[in-house]
Image (cartoon, coloured by chain):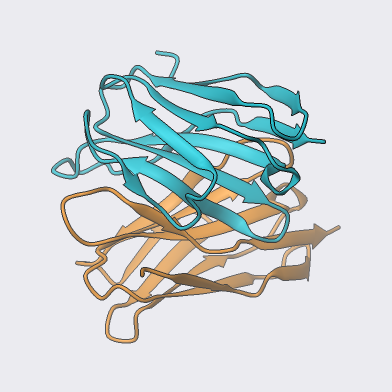
Chain colours: A orange, B cyan
Amino acid sequence: GENVEQHPSTLSVQEGDSAVIKCTYSDSASNYFPWYKQELGKRPQLIIDIRSNVGEKKDQRIAVTLNKTAKHFSLHITETQPEDSAVYFCAAISSGGYNKLIFGAGTRLAVHP
Amino acid sequence: NAGVTQTPKFQVLKTGQSMTLQCAQDMNHNSMYWYRQDPGMGLRLIYYSASEGTTDKGEVPNGYNVSRLNKREFSLRLESAAPSQTSVYFCASTPPRTGTNTEAFFGQGTRLTVV
């Protein structure tokens, strides 16, 4: 079945450094790749997404890149701040007519002042 | 708009008891999902419903049943709870695939403990 792998599972950086989280997906027909941020005790919330017709998308300090040939996509956070500390999930929508979202296992990001 | 509303927020069950988790969305979304979240395991899909009247198994459906009562509501039932079902459960919904916005909206979660 469809699978999304995410690495690393934990990431610790100093404030101001960059953080990169990588995901690979198995369904070559997937065409939508969102990233969610989950703060402790809260629900996941969308922070950025990318569709298969573009290779990169930026939103202030956050960017996502997509390599459809290799079936992987990455989240880049620059100039990290303590409030970026959270669990980040990548996801892919499977093929077909359904919006079936499959998530990676998550990355716990800690940004130290 | 309330978005996605889940009830209850917390629940403690004894092994063998049954319960139904309720989920409702007011965004006219077609697709709805139930996920469970265990520490270090991410969000695992239990069941999903592409549209009213249809349901399909996800990655971890054993021990659960679902019902898509109408377009707004999607319930998850545990017939005979087991300690392995201790988890945080999230309901989510997404708009029709034909739209440009495919964002998933999540409920606030249900923390279930089975003792």
Is residue B4 shown to the viewer in this render? no
Q: Residue at x 39, y 13 (%)?
A: B1
The x, y position of residue A50, in whole percent, is: 33, 59
What is the tally of numbered marks visible in this picture?
0
Q: Nearer the viewer, residue B14 or A59?
A: B14
Q: Residue A10 location in percent, x, y? A: 73, 69
- Quarter of the figure with residue B20: top right
Q: Is residue A103 above or below residue B83?
A: below
Tell me if B37 is positioned left or right of A48 in this view.
right
User: In the drawing, does residue A90 fall left or right of residue A106?
Assistant: left
Residue ID at (75%, 44%): B83
- Residue A106 horizontal/vertical position (percent): 61, 61
Q: Is residue B46 above or below residue A75?
A: above
Residue farthest to the right, as pictured: A113
Image quadrant for the C terminus of chain B? top right
Residue at the spot 62% in from the left edge and 45% down from the top edge: A38
